[in-house]
Image: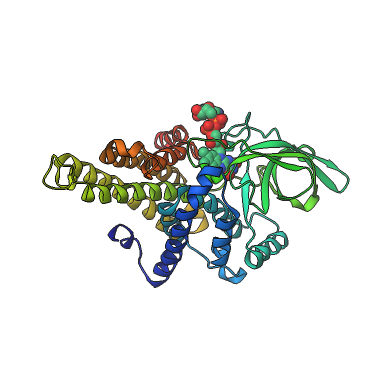
């Protein structure tokens, strides 16, 4: 389909795209159950394991595919056309692995051991940082989860919210206030460690299949070297290209809504017309608007991803405002496109018999993934005023 072809530029990308398409079709089939149960199924994870999907963002030297940011977004966007919740979920894992490998944030021996497990066993990980009182970690609040050192171990206690894939993850990267360092740090913790429990709190309007439940830590014993990150001044925050998996996901949902709306417009022939509604001016207006919006948002996203891939690590810091802007543009455009698709579908769009109502609910969640719109606008304003 032309909407996909224009961003596939070589044979490697075609191969990656086709793999993603296979998985997207499976995710679409299984997505219905994930949506009902409000959690990602183990079977879905196994589909991805069989394709060695979870090691794709590791460099080839460590046994991965060495996906560029552009390639990562290409597969994520296509996955989300199949099922948005699945794409967002696995996107966290792939993105985190990409960042860890490229930024060398952890001690090399710890990361290499972990990377080996990712390649050989296709284990999956996610950062769990949000909390009720602290809210989004991007606001800079100190976590209420505490790590207290006793002898050769830390003991972690606290509750994390919005933990995507909570029940199927092998590892959590848990943020906590580390008392003896007087700093916020992150621990790599096995998900089945004693003292960890999951509370099924994820009963949301959209992105239900992500199973983003609460995870509770009650005096969880962790080895000292599993304090893998410390956010102090020696470790400043860097631009995060990998977070573009979020806009790719929501644009994928919008593409799915656009495709189904066009399909519907071509096939629906009410008895008040001699043709299908695809011939009606106001329907054509909406279809044109959907494509215009998608063109703008997608070309912006893929252009910034290409910039990221072509730049040095220092040069990448200069486009951090653009990275943030892509997220705001894409998630808002995705909401607008799905809204237009719903208007084309008419009242049928409200029925659970069609996918439109799920797109409408899922796409809304994008507004609450980082960075939030108000922060992005502020970043742009501050940069403009500082020039
Ligand atoms: C589908 C989905 C999956 C997610 N997966 C994960 C995950 O895997 N791991 C994870 O850690 N998190 C995850 N999150 C959580 C996400 O990153 C946010 O933490 C969460 O959505 C709460 O965002 P919020 O803006 O409502 O938070 P809050 O910070 O609680 O904000 C609530 C309101 O207060 C305002 N506000 C709060 N603080 C400030 C401030 N300092 N200045 C100005 N305004 C403020 C906000 O703008 C907002 O209007 C996920 C969220 C969603 C929707």
The residue that appears at 17% across and 47% down in the rendered structure is: 276
The location of residue 83, given as percent across then percent down, is: 45, 51
- Comparing 122 with 66, the one in front is 122
In the image: residue 322, left or right of residue 113: left
The residue lying furthest to the front in this view is: 271
Looking at the image, can residue 58 be seen? no
- Comparing 108 with 344, the one in front is 344
- Look at the image and tell me in which quarter the N terminus lies: bottom left
The location of residue 176, given as percent across then percent down, is: 70, 39
In the image: residue 343, left or right of residue 96: left
The location of residue 59, given as percent across then percent down, is: 57, 66
Q: Quadrant of residue 71?
A: bottom left
**Relative to residue 50, is residue 257 depicted above or below?**
above
Q: How is the image coloured?
A: rainbow
The residue lying furthest to the right in this view is: 151
**Relative to residue 53, is residue 366 depicted above or below?**
above
Location of ligand 1 given as a quarter of the image: top right
The residue that appears at 12% across and 42% down in the rendered structure is: 273
- Count the numbered circles shown: 0
The location of residue 116, given as percent across then percent down, is: 67, 66
Looking at the image, can residue 371 be seen? yes
The residue lying furthest to the top in this view is: 133
- Look at the image and tell me in which quarter the C terminus lies: top left
Q: Quadrant of residue 133?
A: top right
In the image: residue 335, left or right of residue 26: left
The residue that appears at 40% across and 43% down in the rendered structure is: 359
- Comparing 304 with 196, the one in front is 196
């Amino acid at each position: 389909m032309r909407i996909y072809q224009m961003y596939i530029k070589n044979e490697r990308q075609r191969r990656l795209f086709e793999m993603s398409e296979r998985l997207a079709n499976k995710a679409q089939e299984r997505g219905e159950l994930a949506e009902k149960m409000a959690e990602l199924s183990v079977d879905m994870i196994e589909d991805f394991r069989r394709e060695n999907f979870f090691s794709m963002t590791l460099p080839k030297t460590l046994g991965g595919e060495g996906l560029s940011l552009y390639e990562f977004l290409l597969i994520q966007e296509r996955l989300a056309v199949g099922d948005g919740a699945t794409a967002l979920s696995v996107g966290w894992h792939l993105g985190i692995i990409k960042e860890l490998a490229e930024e060398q944030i952890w001690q090399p021996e710890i990361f290499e051991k972990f990377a080996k497990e990712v390649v050989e066993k296709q284990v999956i990980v996610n950062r769990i940082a949000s909390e009720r009182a602290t809210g989004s970690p991007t606001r800079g609040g100190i976590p209420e989860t505490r790590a207290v050192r006793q002898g050769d171990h830390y003991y972690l206690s606290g509750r994390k919210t919005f933990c995507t894939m909570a029940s199927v993850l092998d590892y959590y990267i848990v943020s906590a206030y580390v008392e003896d360092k007087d700093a916020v740090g992150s621990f790599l913790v096995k998900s089945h460690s004693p003292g960890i429990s999951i509370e099924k709190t994820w009963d949301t309007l959209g992105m239900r299949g992500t199973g983003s439940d609460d995870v509770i830590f009650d005096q969880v014993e962790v080895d000292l070297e599993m304090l893998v990150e410390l956010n102090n001044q020696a470790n400043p925050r860097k631009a995060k290209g990998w977070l573009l998996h979020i806009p790719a996901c929501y644009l994928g949902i919008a593409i799915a809504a656009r495709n189904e709306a066009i399909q519907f417009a071509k096939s629906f022939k009410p008895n008040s017309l001699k043709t299908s509604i695809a011939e009606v001016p106001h329907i054509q207006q909406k279809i044109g608007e959907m494509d215009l919006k998608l063109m703008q948002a997608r070309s912006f996203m893929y252009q910034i991803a290409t910039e990221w891939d072509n730049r040095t690590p220092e040069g990448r810091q200069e486009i951090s405002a653009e990275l943030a802007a892509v997220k705001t543009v894409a998630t808002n455009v995705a909401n607008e496109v799905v809204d237009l698709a719903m208007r084309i579908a008419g009242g049928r769009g409200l029925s659970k018999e069609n996918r439109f109502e799920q797109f409408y609910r899922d796409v809304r969640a994008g507004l609450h993934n980082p960075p939030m719109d108000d922060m992005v606008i502020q970043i742009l304003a501050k940069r403009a005023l500082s020039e």
